[in-house]
Image (tube, rainbow, N blue to C red):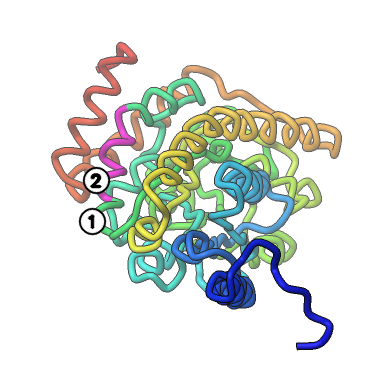
Amino acid sequence: MSGERPIEGCSPKGRRRVVLAAGMAAAVASIGGTPALRAQPVVRLDLSTVLPDGNFHTTNCRTFADEVGKATGGAVRITVHAGGALGYTAPEHLTAVRDGLVQMADLLDTQQAGDAPLFGIEAVPFLVANMTELALLHRRLRPAFDTVAARFNQTILYVVPSPAQCLLARTRIDGPSSLRGVRVRVADRSAADMVAALGMVASQLPWIDTRPALASGAVAAVTTTSTSAVNGQLWQFLRYFHRTNHAWGSQVLTINNGAWKRISPAHRAVILDLATRLQPRFWQSAIDADAFAARRLVESGMEVIDLSPATMKEMRERTSRLEKVFVERAGAETGEIIAAYRKELGRA
């Protein structure tokens, strides 16, 4: 015991208690902190998105992840995996989160319509004309989206739209007759049905094949958003960007319910409050991205065109039956949502 000094004011028995307590404290420290901290381990979550870094939706995901970390004092840590890095394609995200293959995903609603038909509602042609109308639709739509998510074992945190789908073409569209026979690249069956109703010829292609199809002359038009048009530098092939706003799509940030329950009730409340507060800011990011993209298209030589009311009216009439087809597939509740939305707009 040489070199050791007695603990003043302690009996031998008291000294043994102090030494024992110190040893227990050292043991706890060596395995990662106090018992209270070990009872509430850090919850680590992976978030999958097919959208690349630089896309405003991915930026929103990273902002949300950072804010969640701050708001929970580091107790919940979200890692964003962009560009499909985890290996899931866009249409697989709803079921991947359902099955717990990934804890979180930023999924495009319309691409999940095969599993959850209601999620295809924004792709109904000409249902929504602008972001103001889209906000009205979302107000009625969100409870139904939450119900669908629950059936797929997940919870929605926020929903943020992309800019509207529009029509880009080599020649200017002056009326429905100028659409006839034009071969147009579309992303999915809903868009294919719409352009067919307008007399165009649909060519369903993945985005990666769009530029080669334009270069070869296989297609002479494209349906896409302003932001995608910029990303694809479509001004190299097309001259006119027609603001049809014929369809929309929104990114839905969702979390597996098993992973959600691993988070403490207090932190779940904090995260839901954070999502509610950030969602308007994220909507503004969509508006800003659309405005920036439109300016870039003009600067690059494209002409942005608003179609005449008469042309828009005829396009709506030609595609109106597709809304009935959608409601038949998605169910009566969807029809009720659309009817209430139209009544609120004053065009029931």
List the single residue furthest toward the left: 332
- Coordinates of residue 305 in the picture (x, y in percent): 66, 27
- Coordinates of residue 86 in the picture (x, y in percent): 57, 73
- Name the residue at 69% across, 59% down: 214
Q: Is residue 309 magenta?
A: no
- Coordinates of residue 132 in the picture (x, y in percent): 48, 20
Camera-side residue of 334 and 297:
334
Quadrant (top left/top right/bottom left/bottom right) for the N terminus? bottom right
Q: Residues in magenta?
A: 140-148
- Which three-letter amino acid code belongs to the residue tagged 2? Thr
- Coordinates of residue 18 in the picture (x, y in percent): 59, 70
| Contact, mark 1 vs mark 2 (Cβ under 8 Å) | yes
Camera-side residue of 310 and 131:
131
- Name the residue at 30% across, 44% down: 146
Q: Quadrant of residue 11?
A: bottom right
Q: Is residue 146 magenta?
A: yes
Q: Is residue 165 above or below residue 32?
A: above
| Mark 1 element type | helix
Q: CA distance from mark 1 to mark 2?
A: 6 Å
Q: Which residue is mark 1?
A: 151
Q: Quadrant of residue 226?
A: top right
- Which three-letter amino acid code belongs to the residue tagged 1? Arg
Camera-side residue of 232 and 217:
232
Is residue 86 something one can see in this rendering?
no
| Mark 2 element type | helix
252 to the left or right of 308: left
318 to the left or right of 231: left
Question: Which SS does the magenta portion mostly show?
Answer: helix
Q: Which mark is residue 20?
A: none
- Neighbourhood count class around disc 2 (C-alpha, 10 Å): few under 14, some 14–19, many 20 upward: few
Q: Which mark is residue 147?
A: 2
